[in-house]
Image (cartoon, rainbow, N blue to C red):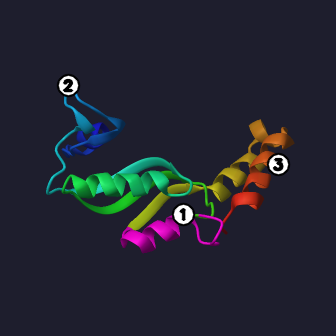
Amino acid sequence: SVALKINHNVDVDVAYNRKEAKDHGEGGELVGAPVKGKTILIVDDVITAGTAIRESMELLAREGAKVVGVSIALDRQEKANEETNQSAIQVVQKEFGIKVCSIAGLEHLLSFLKNSPDFSADANVFSSVSKYREKYGSY
């Protein structure tokens, strides 16, 4: 929101989930701009199983908002659950009929670790992330 205002002179409202409802101050589960009747883009740092996105979707629906998409920094490219090989992103997109976009995926992180002089000398970091991907990866 701040970067859009500074760099593009675009005003964008912001609200965030405080994780547990408060009965003082602004109260409720959301802090910031009212969302009722608004079109919303969810922004999150990472998606693992999609649980946080589902919780946000439920909360925003209760508040009367319409979610049109999700933008995340890192897609860990994990299976949504043990019953499927689909990623959390694929399952969320299908479940809610919205687009989920990520800035980077786990394969980008692995490539960076493998090719970066700062990390390539430490095979443990690359190995640990690779093993994580083998165990939980969806694709």
* Quadrant into which the N terminus falls: top left
Q: Nearer the viewer, residue 123 or 78?
A: 78
Front label number (3 vs 1): 1
- Alpha carbon separation for disc pair 3 and 1: 23 Å
Asked whether residue 112 is drawn in magenta, I would say no
Q: Position of residue 125 (x, y in %)?
A: 78, 41
Query: Element at badge 1?
Result: helix
- Alpha carbon separation for disc pair 1 and 2: 35 Å
Instruction: Determine the residue positioned at 61% across, 64% down.
Output: 81
Quarter of the rendering containing residue 68:
bottom left
Q: Which of marks 1 and 2 is nearer the N terminus?
A: 2
Residue linked to disc 2: 25
Instruction: Determine the residue positioned at 24% across, 45% down.
Output: 8
Residue linked to disc 3: 127
Magenta-highlighted residues: 81-98
Q: Position of residue 115 (x, y in %)?
A: 76, 49
Q: Which of marks 3 and 2 is nearer the N terminus?
A: 2
The label shown at residue 37 is none
Residue linked to disc 1: 88
